Amino acid sequence: MTTSLAREVEHDITVRASARAVYDLIADVADWPQVFPPTVHVEHLERGETGERIRIWATANGTAKTWTSRRELDPGRLRVEFRQEVSQAPVGAMGGCWLVEPLSADECRVRLLHDYRPVDDDPEKLAWIEAAVDRNSHAELAALKATAEGAHDGLLFGFADSVEVDGHARDVFDFINEADRWSERLPHVARVRLEEDTPGLQLLDMDTRTKDGKTHTTTSVRVCLAPTTIVYKQIRVPALMTLHTGRWQIDQRPGGGLVVTSRHTVRINEDNITSVLGPGADVPAAREFVQKALSANSLATLGHAKTYAERRA
């Protein structure tokens, strides 16, 4: 890099897991939303034997960003190099490398290297990038460690709910996409605020009513991929969860009509189980409680989307 404001930084962490298992978590970008807090969604644009081109949607300093990167995977050296080919301001260029170094059969060191420069060689933009890289690197390494070391703790699980709709996919998509109207359309939504500075990239802040009349507040980043898919990640979650990602998927039925599915992936916050559910509650009880609550809201939303689309059809 020739610019005077180019920077190179390194962050690292020690993980009590095999180097291969940790490398596999880094290499498999499909699971990144469940592993890394900043990552909302990843899609492969190209995929080869050792290289790939991906688009990432993620948060940086509290804002939602998207960019396209190329990655080179070297499983023999436990190394993944990355370079943004299309960055988003204030980033002018960004690249780096994941390095996994075995320390023993069940322990390794992970190094995360970045090099970057700001748009227009601007010191204020550089400070913004430095803060985002430092915050996200610490969060990603800590999450990688927690995931690798707790891979079989039973806290992470997923489930889905579906309805059949005799209507048009575009109408179903519009109902789910227009979340700014949910407080008018959905009885369980008490308040909603939607920001969409970049088309298809939404920040959704919402108060949801529970059966006992209480409300809880969630904040989600949503990636809206018309006309069939909306994926989201809650960046502010209820007390019983440390992770909640979801996907609204609209598929054509072979015989006509649609199947609309709401998928959830959740990680239970074990530290809050008894304070929320009472003494004696355990992980299975928390899983059951969360699934029932989320399914109830999903099925209510799906039901209203079905009615909306079928009336318009």
Image (tube, helix red, strand yellow):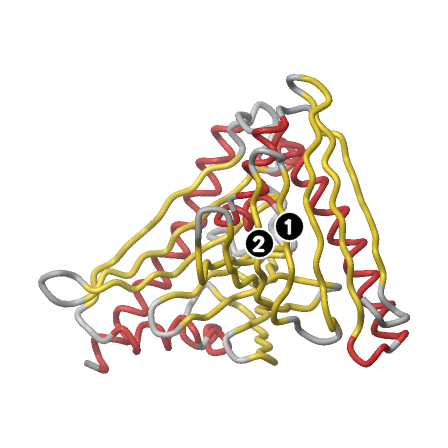
68 or 166, nearer to the observer: 68
Q: Residue furthest left?
A: 255
Q: Mark 2 is on which residue type?
A: Arg
Q: Quadrant of residue 188?
A: bottom left
275 or 22, nearer to the observer: 22
Residue 81 in view in this figure: yes
- Mark 1, residues whose alpha carbon is within 10 Å: few (<14), some, or many (≥20)? some
Label 2 residue SS:
strand
Rendered view: 29 above or below 153: below
47 or 27, nearer to the observer: 47
Question: In the picture provided, is 225 more to the left or to the right than 19?
Answer: left
Question: In the picture provided, is 7 more to the left or to the right than 195?
Answer: right
Q: Which mark is residue 71?
A: 2
Q: Which mark is residue 169?
A: none
Residue at 55% across, 26% down = 153
Q: Mark 1 is on which residue type?
A: Glu
Q: Check whether the beta carbons of the residues at disc 2 and disc 1 lie within 8 A of each other.
A: yes
- Mark 2, residues whose alpha carbon is within 10 Å: few (<14), some, or many (≥20)? many
Residue at 74% across, 73% down = 92
Where does the image place residue 209, in percent across and percent down from the top left?
A: 51, 59
Where does the image place residue 292, in percent across and percent down from the top left?
A: 41, 44
Where does the image place residue 301, in percent across and percent down from the top left?
A: 37, 63
Residue at 72% across, 68% down = 93
Quadrant of the drawing holding the N terminus: bottom right
Quadrant of the drawing holding the C terminus: bottom left
Q: Which residue is mark 1?
A: 81
Where does the image place residue 152, in percent across and percent down from the top left?
A: 53, 25
Q: Earlier in the sequence, mark 2 or mark 1?
A: 2
Residue at 85% across, 69% down = 126
Question: In the picture provided, is 174 more to the left or to the right than 37?
Answer: left
